[in-house]
Amino acid sequence: MLALRLARGAHPLILIRRLTVAAAAAGTGFLLLCTLGYAMGHPEASQSALLRLAWCAAPLAATVHLAVAVARTDPGTRPQPGLSAVGLGPVRLMVLAAATTAMACTLGSMLALLFFLHLRGDLTGLPFDGAAAGLLGGGQSLPLAAALTLLALTPVIASCCAALVLRPRRPGPRGEQDPRQPAAPAPAPTGLPWGVALIAAGLAVETYAATAQGTPDGLPMPGRLVGIPAGVLAGWAVTALGLALAGPGLTALCGRLLGALRPGAARLLAGRVLRAEAQRIGRPLGVVCAVAAGGIAVAALYGARQPQIGPLTVLGAVLVVGCPLLTLATAALEARQARAHTTAALVRLGAPVSVLRGAAALRAGALLAVFGPLTWAVAALAALPMTR
């Protein structure tokens, strides 16, 4: 009930972020229900139905990632002075964040169920009644338990991940830090070596799998795309994980490069901000790079060919691409809110606005200069064994 009241009284921008989570959950839930409808309409193609269900893991992961990022930036779930006195301590706020995330995802899942039933022809009175009855197993009784189980995946996984990320941290050996004291500097990211190792290992697995198995007879891709060996997909998953792990370290490296060789005020400020925000924006940036590299590799693989893909493949691609972009935008907004007091203090001290804008441009340019060539290089190396 408290989560519902906070949702009703939230700022419009916060409501928009929650609605994006609901929309992503609706798309993922609809894809999961479509796999159930396909299995009902084609009982002889059980392996194909399981493969379609497995392909829903990517949109599901993207939706959960977005839901956790929105939960992190929700001001209603942050520890504030005085909340513990009314019973809203760190544990209660964690539960509140999980409940809010589950509520948004459940709303999206229910919308997906209504749209699915409408396209099956179970709900009438609206346009396109039963438009996809043959594809979604129309005319057969829907197994309610299976449908609800599939719809519950997104809310349950997203709420559990939000609770895990926002769980209370143990205080240091000296107890809780005094809010009047300056916060300790964020530790430097340590995942860069592991990320680079995973990227190299993933590319090696892709090369070996493509050379050993060839490309004609592989794992069927969504829609009517040419099959790809399972080993190549496994190697690409390892590469994407490596990019996500290396993202914070690369972001901190950008900050160190900006602050090297006698920097001016703008470069010094930009470098310090990047190092401070490396953990917050580095991982979403790495995920976006992984998605972009995958898109470039697919475009290089098919070249001038234009395969005919269905609407469900388009929906899955929109979720896989759109959710990481929204997650990165949400993380950037969280970073901006975190340094709002510092920016206000600089303005009060007389810092020119041009310096702040120049520092923002330097941050964007440095990230683009590092992550852009890296994305292109990973995509080229990933597509090279498949195009030879």
Image (cartoon, helix red, strand yellow):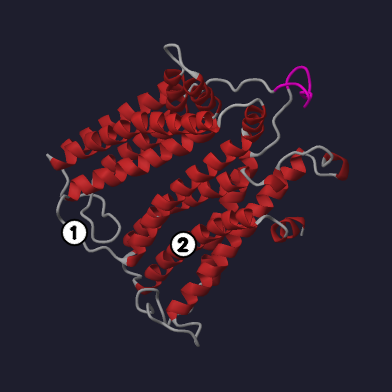
When the figure is inspected, residue 41 is found, relative to residue 236, above or below; the finding is below
* Any part of residue 193 in sight: yes
Q: CA distance from mark 1 to mark 2?
A: 24 Å
Going by the numbered disc 2, the residue's amino acid type is: Gly
Going by the numbered disc 1, the residue's amino acid type is: Gln
Could you say which is closer to the camera, residue 5 or residue 141?
5
Query: Residue at point 49% right, 58% down?
Result: 24
Q: Can you give x and y, in whole percent of width and height, for residue 243 in the image?
A: 39, 33
The magenta span reads: 172-182
Mark 1 highlights which residue?
306
Could you say which is closer to the camera, residue 146 or residue 270?
270
Q: Quadrant of residue 207?
A: top left
Q: Is residue 311 magenta?
A: no
* Any part of residue 142 in sight: no
Query: Residue at point 44% right, 47% down?
Result: 325
Q: Earlier in the sequence, mark 1 or mark 2?
A: 2
Q: Can you give x and y, in whole percent of width and height, for residue 38 in the image?
A: 37, 69
Q: Can you give x and y, in whole percent of width and height, for residue 233 in the image?
A: 30, 43
Mark 2 highlights which residue?
27
Main secondary-structure element of the magenta-colored stretch: loop
From the viewer's perspective, tell me whether residue 106 is left or right of residue 364: right
Could you say which is closer to the camera, residue 322 or residue 210?
322
Query: Residue at point 35% right, 74% down?
Result: 135
Question: Which residue is at the far left?
Answer: 388
When the figure is inspected, residue 252 is found, relative to residue 261, above or below; the finding is below
Instruction: Locate the N terminus and report the quarter of the image it occupies.
Output: bottom right
